[in-house]
Image (tube, grey):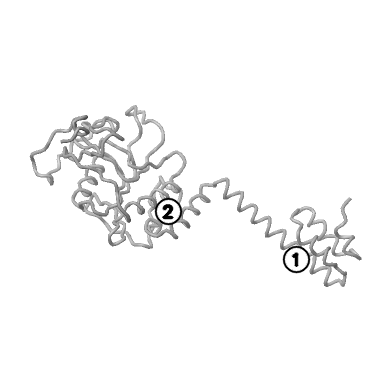
Amino acid sequence: MDDHRRAYSLKAPGLTRSSSALRLPGRDSFPSVEDHLVEAEVTRDEIIGGRRVVAMPAHRPHATQHTRLDYVVDAHVVPGYEAATDLLTRHDEDSDFASDTCVSKEGVDPATGVRYLEEIVFEVVSEQNERLVTEKAVRMHSRGVRRIFTIWVKGQRVCEWSPESQSWRPLAADSQIEDPCLVKPLAVAALLDAATADDAVLEALVAKGNPAYRKREAAAEAKGRAEAMTDSILKILETRGVAVSPAERQQILRCRDLERLDRWLRRAILAATTAEVTSEP
């Protein structure tokens, strides 16, 4: 064991029983979600069922898939909730591990005095043992995590944990994940495809009433109205046989003041010259 390993000790007891035998305590015996067996940002260890598991950094495409997952999920979270990456949680007496991405309520749970437990969890699975991922799902659900999803890098598929069947249920690529924690249904395809992810994030931000997008939409709408009004002014003058010089045409086309364009449109119906239309006091 190297010096770094000697610098800390694991509080979880070692297990001699089979790793497939899960001892899941009743809800009354759950420790606080913040009562950790390992130290975050000090080790790469997680504790699952009393066994130390080293959470290794990822290679592509696992790492890029994780980035896309964070990008999409964070945009979809409703106000009052928050997304987190690698949030270390005590899921039972002998387990302390982090999900890849999760969603939980903001603030402090008055029932426990610490943060709220995750409600939705996403795991990216590439080289990780499927049996271990399944064990984590069982323990998370036993703790109270409502929904658990996996994104399988190999095969490009998304599954949801089914407590009833104790198995992973594949989700259709064209399906959506609906949940009270999400501002709008999350397209499964957005978790797998970069272009679809961008569209989904944009739609989620619009659904949230994001100020920047609302401002952009308002500007686009105003521009469209101005272009329609300038076109109408020029067509009216042309139909009435009123001469429009190149300079006057450019003056009308460049105008984006909707109130001024409205005045010009009204004048164009009766004006004898274009100057009478565009003159302002």
Amino acid type, label 1: Asp
**Rendered location of residue 50, percent (x, y):** 16, 37
User: Which one is in front in this view, the residue at disc 1 or the one at disc 2?
Assistant: 1
Q: Residue 231 carries which label?
A: 1
Establish if 154 lies above or below 139.
below
**Residue at the limit of the structure toward the left, as seen here:** 16
Considering the image in quadrants, where does the N terminus appear?
A: top left
Q: Residues within 10 Å of mark 1 (few under 14, many from 20)?
A: some
Q: Residue 146 carries which label?
A: none
Task: Kindly identify the residue that appears in the image at 83 percent across and 63 percent down.
Answer: 247
**Rendered location of residue 74, percent (x, y):** 43, 46
**Rendered location of residue 89, percent (x, y):** 28, 36
Q: Closest to the observer: 212 or 140?
A: 212
Task: Kindly identify the residue that appears in the image at 65 percent across and 56 percent down.
Answer: 221
Does 213 sit left or right of 152 as displayed? right
As measured in the structure, the alpha-carbon distance from the residue carrying label 1 to the one carrying label 2 is: 40 Å
